[in-house]
Image (tube, rainbow, N blue to C red):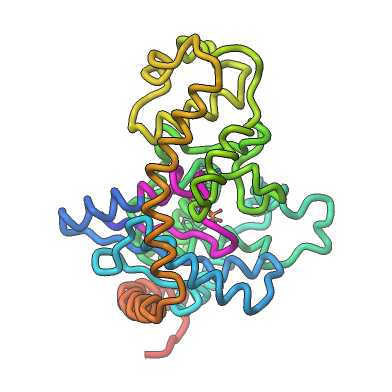
Amino acid sequence: MRIVSGIQPTGNLHLGNYLGAIRNWVRMQDEVTATGGESLFFLADLHSLSDHIDRDVRLASVRDMTAALIACGIDPAKSILFNQAAVPAHAELCWLLNGTARMGWLNRMTQWKDKAGKNREGASIALFDYPVLQAADVLLYQATHVPVGDDQKQHLELARDIATKFNTDTGVDLFTLPEPFIPPAAARIMSLRDGTAKMSKSDPSDMSRINLSDPDDAISQKVRKAKTDPEPLPSDPMGLAGRAEAANLVSIYAALADSDTATVLGEFGGSQFGPFKAALADRLIERITPIRERYEALRGSPELDRHLQDGAARARAVAAPTLARAYDALGLIAAK
Ligand code: TYM
């Protein structure tokens, strides 16, 4: 079993990242370490070129996000933790796969359509090619499982299509088809201000998300002000239909309690949002405070660059045989 996943080093880690992905990275890291497999987690700094980000901001974000991942429980002694730019094989394999990927496939990607909007002529090539680099990220390591939130499902299906076409076109059975691991609950955490929009780093309103760096009083305030409706909570999950904001808060609570919405509603059904929100804020604070404290202690530490350098060296070694076989399968004479 080989687990691979990445995160863009832009902005803060938020609750959606944590419940949709990072918490599963930590669980899977511990499982594979116990069973002799491997886990690789990376900061997708090359992907971040699809947005314009100031040089110094990007540099600081990569280090801060490394600190945040370690604070969440990614252990550089158990997992290979690195940044993409330090492993040139990602960019190289992306270019090789550009011969396999089809314009039509990329044109159908919802992230491309959403982010490019009407201004396709002005969008960067990096934004369009983004899913091919993402395919390279996982195929390079022969990943078997890729833990992600629901919004990355389409990109992973594309990675499987690219792998299948490459294997067929070259007649070389090179790439393993990666399985997405999308958690059954909390795969799509929504904004606290709008239950139809995903919780995201790029939402201009900080009140829309809980950051893992938020102090306790900010967490309480954001939960207290989270949008709801005037009805009390229903006593069973069917009653959440058409109540996107309520459904979101209940599923956050269920994910934090390692429970399910039916059990949570068994406890809070019939109650007003006030007491439920207070209990939810307590759960969030209980989970986030230790992460924030570890994050603050790690931030700016010279250890972070050492972990990244060490992780990149290990990742380069894992990537090398697959990259060499990809060059060879295409009839390219690569550096030895
Ligand atoms: P990114 O940086 O947007 O998000 C990192 C992870 O967090 C998950 N996530 C969410 N899950 C639930 N609810 C939300 N509101 C929410 N917002 C984010 C994402 O699904 C993701 O798992 N393209 C990727 C990074 C990437 C990658 C890869 C992932 C690059 N190469 C290879 C997997 C494999 C991205 O932008 O994730």
Which of the 4 quarters of the picture holds residue 126?
bottom right
Q: Position of residue 279 (x, y in %)?
A: 44, 28
Q: Position of residue 64 (x, y in %)?
A: 49, 68
Which of the 4 quarters of the picture holds residue 323?
bottom left
Residue 320 visible in this rendered orientation of the protein: no
Residue at 62%, 33% in the rendered image:
226
Residue at 49%, 59% in the rendered image:
7
Q: Which residues are magenta?
A: 4-24
Residue 293 visible in this rendered orientation of the protein: yes
Residue at 55%, 22% in the rendered image:
274
Residue at 83%, 51% in the rendered image:
118
Q: Is residue 153 left or right of residue 117?
A: left
Q: Quadrant of the C terminus?
A: bottom left
Q: Is residue 129 left or right of residue 215?
A: right
Which residue is farthest left?
35
Q: Quadrant of the N terminus?
A: bottom left
Q: Nearer the viewer, residue 15 or 90?
A: 15
Is residue 207 shown above or below 129?
above
Q: Is residue 277 magenta?
A: no
Which residue is farthest front?
217
Q: Nearer the viewer, residue 323 or 51?
A: 51
Q: Position of residue 256 (x, y in %)?
A: 39, 36
Q: How many marks?
A: 0
Is residue 298 shown above or below 334?
above
Is residue 307 shown above or below 25?
below
Q: Nearer the viewer, residue 51 or 204?
A: 204
Q: Is residue 180 left or right of residue 61?
A: left
